Image: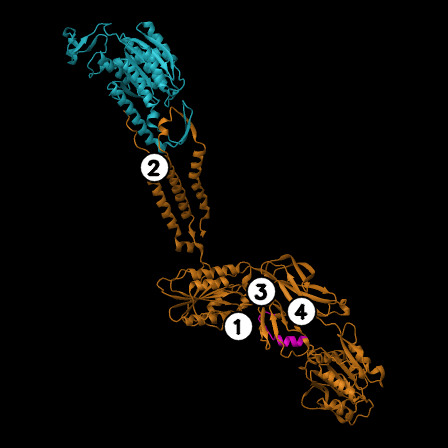
Amino acid sequence: MNDFQPAVSDSRRFIDPETLVRIASLELVARTVVEGFISGLHRSPHLGFSVNFAEHRAYHPGDDIRKIDWNVYGRTGRFYVKEYEGETNTSLHILLDCSRSMSYGSKGITKLEYGQFLAASLGYFAFKQRDSIGYVSYDEDLLEYIPARGSTGHLNTVLHAIERAEAGRKTDFIKSLVKVSERLRRRGIVVVISDLYDEPAHVMNGLRHLAFRGHDVIVFQVLDHAELQFDFAAAAQFVDMETRAEMHVLPEYMRSQYRILLGKQIEENERECRKDRIDFSLIDTSTPLDSALFSYLVRREQLY
Amino acid sequence: MSFLNPLFLIGGLAAAVPVLLHLVRREHAKKIEFPTLMFLRRISRKTIRYRKLRRLLLLLLRVFALLFIVLAFMRPYRETTEAAPVAGIVTTAHIIALDNSMSMDYRDRWEQARKAASAITRNSNPGDRFAVVEFSDTALGPARLTTASEALSRIEAIEPTDRPTRYGQALRAAEKLALDAGTGKRIVHLISDFQKNGWTSDDQDFRLAAGVELRTIDVGSDEFSNITIRDVRITEADETNGNETKLTASVVNFGNLDRKNIRISLSVDGREVADRRIDISGSASQGIDFRLLRLVPGTRRVVLTVDDPNLQRDNRFHLNLQARGKTQVQLVENPAKGRHSSFFLSKALDIDVLSPYTLKPAAPEKIIRSGGLLIWNDVPGRTAAVQQKIRDFVEAGGGLVLVLGESTNAGEFNRSFGSWLPVKVAEPPFAANRTGSRPVEDYVLMTDISTDHPIFRPFSQPHSGSFSSARFFRHVRVSVSEGSEVPARFDNGDPALVAANAGKGRVLVFASSADDSMNDLPLKAVYAPFWQQMLRFLEKYRERRHWREIGETIDPRKLLMDAAGNSLSDESIAVLDPAGQRLTAGGDAEHVLLEKSGFYEIRTMNSIASVAANTPPKESDLTHGDAEEMAAGWVSHGSAEFRQEGPVAPEEQEKRQRIWILFLIAGAVLLVSEMLLSRAATDNRPATPVP
């Protein structure tokens, strides 16, 4: 299970998401995040691999020992093998949930914006790894589909597409993810960035569709801090952003129950995902993006 | 309950704050867009209901905590006028002497007194015994001491009366009850307005027995204002006042406040006939005249009313006005003398407005037998039939004046009138040295007069007329026997006027002429009133009192007899009080005590009399006496205690009761409860760790 707080998290080095909002260019955001993340990894004595993942990877029994980088061994005491550029070649499909509930934000950044930053950062990161990048946005249906490509110009296309994303309508996981899974012919990494606000069964069915197609699925459940803590003080009339249903809520008397129920739901999501070898990470939009990146990194490392 | 600091109630408004907040929050709950209500909807209604209930309970705890704290700061106390019971006393005998005289009905004095009396019963120790003595000029109390609840019931049943105040009887009655209580603490609580007029010289000599404590509760005040009609003077109709009866009401303003536009009204037999409006200064009196046209003969009920709301019991003055009309007097004259013999009589009696009588000449044979008055003016030659007629007339209740003039014959008189009257004419009838001429110096005077006799009583006062100047040149010598009285004699000792009863009637024998043939009495001023008095005596006319005072007793039978002019034999008599309640009935009517103001009626089958009763004028004077001085005079030196209480000061009452502590404790307990419940209710647990 991924650690909620990545080991290299350092608020001084990694820009908080609220600040990222002020950066006009998504590409710049992605670069800023990724470069910062990479530089953090460089300086960390605890990591066992080089950031130049295009050139190094951890040693697995059976690897050609001639590819072991002894300099790195001398530095770290661990075995890493060199990889040549172009040696690793996978595709990354970023699925961004653009349902209306993703437009919620309590601290200056909405879940969708956070998701966009995350998607852009992952895309940029993958580009640096010479992976091909594809992008899908959806709500109750597919909104935009960009197949995976590996060219430089394609990164910009993807980034632009991510930048264009806007919160739309309701959520329909099954319908959207089934459509996505039918389009993704080539196996790769599928990153789902969503708040997973749909019927739990629908969510898992949608994810399983992807997993059963042989994709490596990473799920980032992105939730706002207010959704997680439910630190509302006064009684209020709560309005569902997608269904527009209303409910009078007394937070002080419903908070604990809410947290319990949400926690259980998250646990169930994680448990179900684990069953199908789907990576699950809960992301609080008030935390820096590096933990998400780290999760991606580790997963990719396990694969390759 | 009362409060020392009522302004703290403003703080009580703070108690409304949580309520308002609670309401406002509910009413103006803002709308918040939330990604999904999925999880919120799963929270059970039961949980929400439970939490709502707990929230309401918190609200109530806060409100009541605030309220109790505010009440504590307001320093509440229960009003009581009784000092706290002395600690250590197991049983105490409380004798509550409650003044319910008329003056206690002034404004709210009675309510204060009743409250004070009730407080005594409530603030007592278990085992204490009580007696309630209501007093005015009499004292009414129980035979023995009772419980607090019985005493309280009695207090609530007592009402003010129309009666005056006398403290002596009340204290004596209270003392007796206190001494009957035996050993233990004995307290007499005297609750009164301590009216100065209620303290008589008799009361000053009274001393409470040793061992009896006296406590006074004074509900009177030095400031007061009461207007009443103290007296009414009646001026009978005459030619000088336009033949109208004039009533002059003496209106008094007790108290030192000037009063304006006070209405005085007059009603006759229940019908208002006149009214006046006056301004009257404080401590002043004023006479108000009312004139009444000639009234219908009979007894008229007159009420004078003053509109003064302060003390209403003395606002009405009742009186009975007797409109007599003219009484017919039969006159039998001596035909030989012509009209001259009755000339002076007619001048004295047959006058339109000055005399209640009118003369009716009658022949001896035609005397009306059914009662009335008859003057037999020196008439000789009575036949037996006539004589019998006269006798029957008198014995049936008539009144007869026998004038013995020049025609008097001793033998004839003695055979006729002398046979049934205790009067005889001497032989010769005239004085021996009287020759029939009128020597100027040869006369006697009627000087020996019984001024106690009803005929001569009005002449007993100085300047009310004198008989001594009347000269009697000739008179008839009469002798009297048992059964007669001689109200007047000549200066030689001979009877001038003899009075005798015969049957139901009366007879007067005048031993001289009714004209100026034997005397010059007709030329004197007393002549007319003298004859009118004789006739009044004969008709048993009583100058009835126009009204009486409450506290007097009346003899109903006697009053009826006076009104009817005859006896009532064994007729049953009923007396009704002003409220119409029957007081007594029976052959032997008892004396009746007048206790209420208004008209009492005394009735039989055939007759009716009215008695007007008014409140005693002195009781309307509410001048406040010094309670301490009065009470100190009733206490034996060195033995019984005296304690003046009056109403206990509010601060002292509050200090004794300390009710604020209870409220403060209650408020504190509620606050602590609110704190504990609030902590349990509010969810401040750390966020559930999420994966």
Circle 3 packing at 10 Å, graded few (<14), some (14-19), many (20+), is many
Depicted A195 relative to depicted A236: above or below: above
What residue do we see at 30% from left, 16% from top?
A209
The circle drawn on residue B621 is 3
Kindly identify the amino acid type of the residue bearing the numbered disc 2: Ala
> From which residue to which does the magenta span run?
B549-563
Q: Which of marks 3 and 2 is nearer the N terminus?
A: 3
What secondary structure is marked by label 2? helix
Task: Quote the CA–CA distance across marks 2 and 1.
Answer: 79 Å
Q: The orange chain is which one?
A: B
The reply to the same-chain question for discs 3 and 1 is yes
Q: Earlier in the sequence, mark 4 or mark 1?
A: 1
Q: Mark 1 points at which residue?
A: B201
Task: Quote the CA–CA distance across marks 3 and 4.
Answer: 25 Å
Depicted A108 relative to depicted B206: above or below: above
Q: Earlier in the sequence, mark 2 or mark 4?
A: 4
